[in-house]
Image (tube, rainbow, N blue to C red):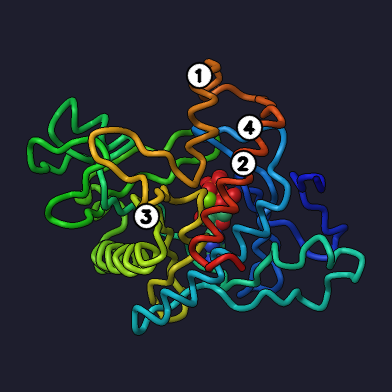
């Protein structure tokens, strides 16, 4: 197995702007970023000590593929994607490491909420529903079972975008409106649901249920347009369930981080810093990610 890339070092070729939990962002010029997906993996907002070899490549190619699918499905959609080609300032010695892991993107003013859309009731939404009959404070029909599809269609359930080290918090769409203001709030809500529906339909035909996902949007400061940013529809940002084994009334086995989350909980390691995944957990997680990708792209 190749080694995981947990940190990038561009040896001064481009200035580092930020390190997120998974990505390292470099500045190409004042309008363009190099958005590099490392092999880091986080769960419950904590980064694991070791990475998943080649996860960054998979996330980058997955995002690029979805940008194309979504742009075809949603007329007028703007995404931050420019190219997978590396800027000419990157020395040849770094190209093998960065190839297919980095994309040049339009630099945006990122809107400070996570635009989550849920088609099925699971995770934190299921927990809240059992306590209060609501999801992000939104009343939903009584009598739903775990993993059931929302009877009136997918719902927009935003969360705050926490600072490093803090936890995102589920909020009601009205709170997102208070944070973003109009017209951005309405545009984000509308686009998020439209994109989820398009992706859900596409994946379902290929045997995958997208239970929920999270989008991020930014504003192009020159035109004030709302632009789809960040990663999209990856196993990091989405819950993918195999359609074949889907059954309501229980949790689902999934092609995503759930394996890692379940392991952390079972070991009492949820939310703990400095966790080293065992080779088995890393291996299982890697193969879940790969499976999700293969089902969506038809095995390429
Ligand atoms: P954070 O950076 O808050 O820790 P994260 O852990 O999810 O969040 P990553 O996914 O590792 O972060 O890094 C991606 C970062 O880049 C996010 O903060 C995201 O908001 C930001 N981002 C994504 N697309 C763009 C863009 N086009 N312009 C500017 N920033 C962007
Ligand atoms: Mg992110």
Gap in angstroms between the C-alphas marked 2 and 3: 20 Å
Residue 281: give its label: 4
Residue at image position (36%, 52%) is 243
Sequence order check, earlier mark of 4 and 1: 1
x and y, in percent, of residue 224 in the image: 39, 76
Gap in angstroms between the C-alphas marked 3 and 1: 25 Å
Direction left: furthest residue: 142
Residue position for label 1: 266
Q: Residues within 10 Å of mark 3 (few under 14, many from 20)?
A: many
Sequence order check, earlier mark of 1 and 2: 2
Gap in angstroms between the C-alphas marked 2 and 4: 12 Å
x and y, in percent, of residue 63 in the image: 54, 65
Sequence order check, earlier mark of 3 and 4: 3
Left or right, residue 292 beside residue 280: left
Q: Residues within 10 Å of mark 2 (few under 14, many from 20)?
A: many
Residue position for label 2: 41
Residue at image position (32%, 45%) is 246
Sequence order check, earlier mark of 3 and 1: 3
Residue position for label 3: 210
Circles 2, 4 touching at the beta carbon (< 8 Å) = no
């Amino acid at each position: 197995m190749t080694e995981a890339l947990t940190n990038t070092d561009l040896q001064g070729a481009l200035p580092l702007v930020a390190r997120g939990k998974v990505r390292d962002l470099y500045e190409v010029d004042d309008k363009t970023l190099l958005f590099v997906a490392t092999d880091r993996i986080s769960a419950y907002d904590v980064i694991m000590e070791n990475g998943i070899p080649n996860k960054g490549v998979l996330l980058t190619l997955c995002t690029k593929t979805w940008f194309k699918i979504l742009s075809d499905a949603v007329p007028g959609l703007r995404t931050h994607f420019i190219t997978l080609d590396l800027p000419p300032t990157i020395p040849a010695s770094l190209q093998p490491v960065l190839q297919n892991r980095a994309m040049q993107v339009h630099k945006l003013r990122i809107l400070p909420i996570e635009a989550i859309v849920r088609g099925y009731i699971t995770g934190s939404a299921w927990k809240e529903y059992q306590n209060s009959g609501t999801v992000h404070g939104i009343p939903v029909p009584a009598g739903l079972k775990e993993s059931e599809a929302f009877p009136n269609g997918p719902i927009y359930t935003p969360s705050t975008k926490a600072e490093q080290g803090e936890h995102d918090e589920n909020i009601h769409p009205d709170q997102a409106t208070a944070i973003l203001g109009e017209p951005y709030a309405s545009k984000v809500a509308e686009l998020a649901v439209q994109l989820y529906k398009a992706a859900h339909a596409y994946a379902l035909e290929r045997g995958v249920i997208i239970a929920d996902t999270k989008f991020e949007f930014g504003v192009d400061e020159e035109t004030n347009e709302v632009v789809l940013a960040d990663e999209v529809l990856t196993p990091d940002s989405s819950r993918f369930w195999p359609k074949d084994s889907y059954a309501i009334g229980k949790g689902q086995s999934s092609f995503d981080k759930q394996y890692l989350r379940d392991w952390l909980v079972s070991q009492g390691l949820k939310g703990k810093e400095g966790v080293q995944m065992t080779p088995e957990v890393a291996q299982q997680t890697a193969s879940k990610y790969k499976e999700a990708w293969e089902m969506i792209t038809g095995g390429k």
